[in-house]
Image (cartoon, rainbow, N blue to C red):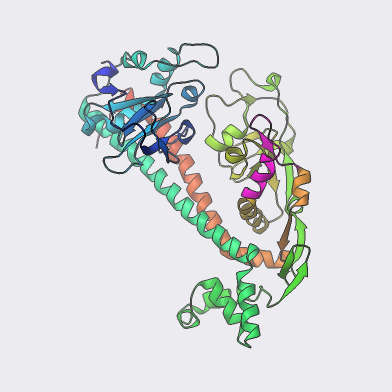
Amino acid sequence: MMLSEIIEFNPTRSIKKGTNAPFIEMAALNQDSRDISYVFQKEFNGSGTKFKNGDTLLARITPCLENGKTAKVNCLKEGEHAHGSTEFIVLKAKEPEYDEDFIYYLCRWTKFRDYAIGRMEGSSGRQRVDWKAIAEFECDLPAKEERKKIGFFLKLIDDKIANNNRINQTVESIAQTLFKSWFIDFDPVKARVEDKKDKKDTLLAALEMISGKRHEEMQNFPSSKYNELRTIADLFPEEFEDSELGWIPKGWSLTSLYETAEYVNGGAFRNGDFSPDKEGLPIIKIAELKSGISPQTQYTTNEVLEKYHINNGDMLYSWSGSPETSLDVFKWFGGEGWLNQHIFKINTKTKEQKVFVYFLLQHLKPQLIEIAKNKQTTGLGHVTIADMKRINIVMPSEKDINLLMGILIPLFDKSSNCMQQNMVLGEQRDTLLPQLLSGKINFKM
């Protein structure tokens, strides 16, 4: 069976020229996940691809096709049409009930992708595959009832991944809000200072600020939880003192961002270090931080300094690249590897210190991006150790950080668990997909 029998390529969609409509760019497609990262409004000028929910977007240009940039559109309003990159091929199921999900997973099938890559044409570095070449892909596709079952089963895995991503975003947002309130805005200290002026119970003010509850509501808390909150609240002083950064909580101190942890830059790997058959451990560059291990990932069997070795749970900071898209702090859950230059491995003495630095770097992201943008050359920028030494932050004592992180650590761990689970789910999906599509596994429900 040829793909053209079940797929309509680049179907007609209606968007009036000159109107603002949802727009999806190539960067919004992920290499290893189904869903589109973001959508923004853009005026439709009459060119580009057009699509709606249920369509599959396949990148047709190098290196995006080789990297696996493929997505199923599911982020638009009902009846809404969107437009996007001219480098997409849009695939619509002729019978959506059976093939809408199946087509997306077929586009992720190694056999199909190798076929498409092998038919790319054009000059080096700008090669593309034509939709007509893809339409001629022929294989023994399962019967349509079987295709429906396969698509439904694999969709369940990606739905779970998407739900974990939503949980992760919510948890990270809550944690970052708490971090900003405590360590940047000093809200519990401000509450105690105000109540001290009015000769009120300052500890109660901090308790209410931290818990988000009135004192009467907190009376229903178990005594252990209430006592824990009192211990946390008591760590915030009831006075401010002057410093180089202005008024800060009394007893807290100033230090540089660089002094908050040990920042180890990755190794400088060269072409001669790469193993030809992807033997050894992967070399983790910025592309791997953002999208995981891919067919383009390089490996090495060379002896490498242990300080460049990374594993699940390590915290990494990308300090060079396109400021808006590359500079960020990452939790790594891609297994063992060697860290490439332009990325810091962040070593801390304690879990509490690690969590503090993680949320600190998240908070400082806009400031660090601005520093990098001011040094941009050909679209790239960077943050240096000298920059990090110039950024002063306010910190309580190490003992107080350890106690204060008691509330943030469970949120940090919840986020990490979602990420780890998604890594396992993604591996299971990618293992099952070719076996289901090739008929090596007979699907039964």
Position in image of residue 321 (x %, y %) = 64, 35
Q: Is residue 47 above or below residue 173?
A: above
Tell me which corner region of the image, top left, top right, bottom left or bottom right, holds residue 16. top left
Q: Is residue 53 above or below residue 407?
A: above
Residue at 64% of width from left, 55% of height from top? 360
Seen from the viewer's position, the closer of residues 79 and 255 is 79
Q: Would you say residue 45 is visible in this rendering?
A: yes
Seen from the viewer's position, the closer of residues 409 and 117 is 117
Position in image of residue 154 (x %, y %) = 34, 36
Asked if residue 295 lies left or right of residue 193, the reply is left
Position in image of residue 233 (x %, y %) = 61, 75
Tell me which corner region of the image, top left, top right, bottom left or bottom right, holds residue 94. top left
Seen from the viewer's position, the closer of residues 103 and 374 is 374
Residue at 61% of width from left, 82% of height from top? 195
Position in image of residue 116 (x %, y %) = 41, 17
Quarter holding the N terminus? top left
Asked if residue 227 lies left or right of residue 427, the reply is right
Q: Residue furthest bottom?
A: 199
Q: What is the magenta range?
A: 366-384
Residue at 55% of width from left, 24% of height from top? 296
